[in-house]
Amino acid sequence: MKHTDKITITEVAHLAGTSKTTVSFYLNGKTDKMSEKTRQRISEVIKETNYKPSVAARSLNSKSTKLLGIMIGDITNTFSNQIVKGIEDVASKKGYQLIVANSNYDYGREEKYIDRMLSMGVDGFIVQPTIQFKEITKKAKKPMVFFDSNVYDYKTKWVKTNNYEATYEATVSCIKKGYKKFILITADPSLLSTRIERTSGYIDALLDNDLAYEKLIVEDGNIKNPKEILDFLIKHINEKEKELIFVPNCWALPMVFIALKDYYHLMPNLGLMGFDNIEWTNFASPSITTIVQPAFKEGQQAASILIDQIECKNEENGQQVLDCIVNWNESTL
């Protein structure tokens, strides 16, 4: 007996000669008071009909769906991939599954996806938010953990890295290595708290050492052609002085590196420092210095904090700062 049409839990109960409640108990693992004969009948009907209970149907009989909603700003980069892998590493061990959405750092998409995930009955959220996201948190009414970028306050749960301190210290190290001129190429810093922290760390290190800098702001996702960057660099690169270029956005670093192809011979006197991208920066020629976030661990910690909230254990520190490291390479002294 094979059913090709999707059948309901009511039909499974009818075919097994038992109640819908009993089938529901079976599906949710509550079989301790159920006879072996009843368990066997339900098991056979489910196998024969290829019955697949929907998440919505199961959530009606359980307080938890074991689903986590994950909102990523840009799913295409390696940092985001490692975050999701870290979340999944912890979630799978705890019996949770992930629903992942890509917001493209757009508030409208954030709002739409949160609403959709709420309708699917997720138990909680892990979110890489834009600055505007705070408005959405008021209506979500589910446990929520922010990562990477955040609307930080004492009430929220979050995991972040020490972006400001790591950038400040790396920049000071470059100053001590003899760099005299400085360039910042960044996407709009005001959109994400992460960008604010990284650009502020760079700028503050320069100002604290009485050093000036040139800045180019590039549009998000709109630098597939590096001509804009190249035109800017041609105006500001001085081959006679030691100069450092800092790119705090992982997606912009490859385009800056491509734009610099006629200047590779000047490195490391012409320095280049970015964030993450270790999947290719170690193998580039010259290899590129980057500040590296512990993305996999960040994902693990975010998942641990969220599940701790969902299960009301209150064992995890709800606000955590992880340390970045500097991967020094040939593009800097």
Image (spheres, grey):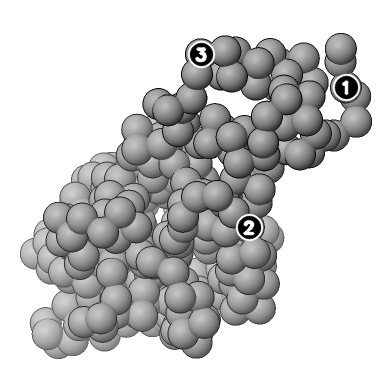
Q: Is residue 21 left or right of residue 237?
A: right
Residue at numbered disc 1: 3
Is 247 or 42 nearer to us in this picture?
A: 42
The vertical placement of 231 against 25, above or below, is: below
Q: Secondary structure at mark 1?
A: loop
* Residue 223 x, y percent position in the rendering: 63, 64
Q: Is residue 155 left or right of residue 272?
A: left
Q: Quadrant of residue 321?
A: bottom left
Q: Which mark is residue 120?
A: 2
Q: Residues within 10 Å of mark 2 (few under 14, many from 20)?
A: some
Residue positioned 46% across, 55% down in the render:
63
The vertical placement of 296 against 72, above or below, is: above
Q: Nearer the viewer, mark 1 or mark 2?
A: 1
Quadrant for the N terminus, please.
top right
The vertical placement of 4 against 70, above or below, is: above
Residue at numbered disc 3: 36
Identify which amino acid the numbered label 3 is placed on: Glu
